[in-house]
């Protein structure tokens, strides 16, 4: 697949794009351990982040939602990465899979668990992680049945189910953008 966008280098950015670039490269994604590179050698943003620069107002809102989902929810790190990787598997999103498998390995996911997620199997998960995985699969299929709603809201609280639905929607949007712009 040929990329549909040429990544913008820092020298090419207008003031609104520069502000968004700085928010991405100076925000929580750039803090702490780096499990995947946000920028390429020329300073351009990798993955979905370059596309956000094309519409700074929408891109800023989208990147802020992503930062909130990644760093300010009540979901555990394992629950969050499990959910992200299930979305990546469903939409065959190579960048999401590559970047979030690196994070998942760093927080203790086994290669067996990762292989299962790639195959969209949730059999190796149990307890609340199993509930999270089931919610993600049902949401990706279009809805959340009452029985699972009851189990998930009891386990995660309504706030947790809300955060999980936002996560599935956000990462599905990224997967769509990555496909549409042919980002590897």
Image (spheres, helix red, strand yellow):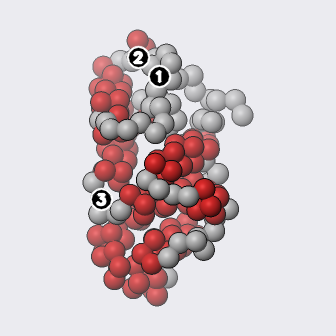
Image quadrant holding the C terminus, namely top right
Residue under numbered circle 1? 44
Q: Is residue 173 above or below residue 17?
A: below
Question: What SS does tag 3 mark?
Answer: loop
- Label 3 – label 2 distance at C-alpha: 31 Å
Examine the rendering and report whether any part of residue 65 can be seen.
Answer: no
Q: Residue under circle 3?
A: 73
Asked if the residue under mark 2 is in contact with the one under mark 1, i.e. CB atoms within 8 Å, the reply is: yes
Q: Earlier in the sequence, mark 3 or mark 2?
A: 2
The one of 161 and 107 positioned closer to us in this rendering: 107
Give the answer, above or below, for where 76 lies relative to 94.
below
Badge 1: few (under 14), some or many (20 or more) residues near its Cα, within 10 Å? some
Sequence-wise, the earlier of marks 3 and 1 is 1
Label 1 element class: loop
Answer left or right for 11 relative to 26. right
Q: Position of residue 36 (x, y in %)?
A: 48, 36
- What's the residue at 38%, 57% (across, down)? 77
- Extreme bottom residue here? 147
Q: Which residue is mark 2?
A: 10
Most distant residue in the top direction: 11
Image-based side of 8 in relation to 60, left or right: right
């Amino acid at each position: 697949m040929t990329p549909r966008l040429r990544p913008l280098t820092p020298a090419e950015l207008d003031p609104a794009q520069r502000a968004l670039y700085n928010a991405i490269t100076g925000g929580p994604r750039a803090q702490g351990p780096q499990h995947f590179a946000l920028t390429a050698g020329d300073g351009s943003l990798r993955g979905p982040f370059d596309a956000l620069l094309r519409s700074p107002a929408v891109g800023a809102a989208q990147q802020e939602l992503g930062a909130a989902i990644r760093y300010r929810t009540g979901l555990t790190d394992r629950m969050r990465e499990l959910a992200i990787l299930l979305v990546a598997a469903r939409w065959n999103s190579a960048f999401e899979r590559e970047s979030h498998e690196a994070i998942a390995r760093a927080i203790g996911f086994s290669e067996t668990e990762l292989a299962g997620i790639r195959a969209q199997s949730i059999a190796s998960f149990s307890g609340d992680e199993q509930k999270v995985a089931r919610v993600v699969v049902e949401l990706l299929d279009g809805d959340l049945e009452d029985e699972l709603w009851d189990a998930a809201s009891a386990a995660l609280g309504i706030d947790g189910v809300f955060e999980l639905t936002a996560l599935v929607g956000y990462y599905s949007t990224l997967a769509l953008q990555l496909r549409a712009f042919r980002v590897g």
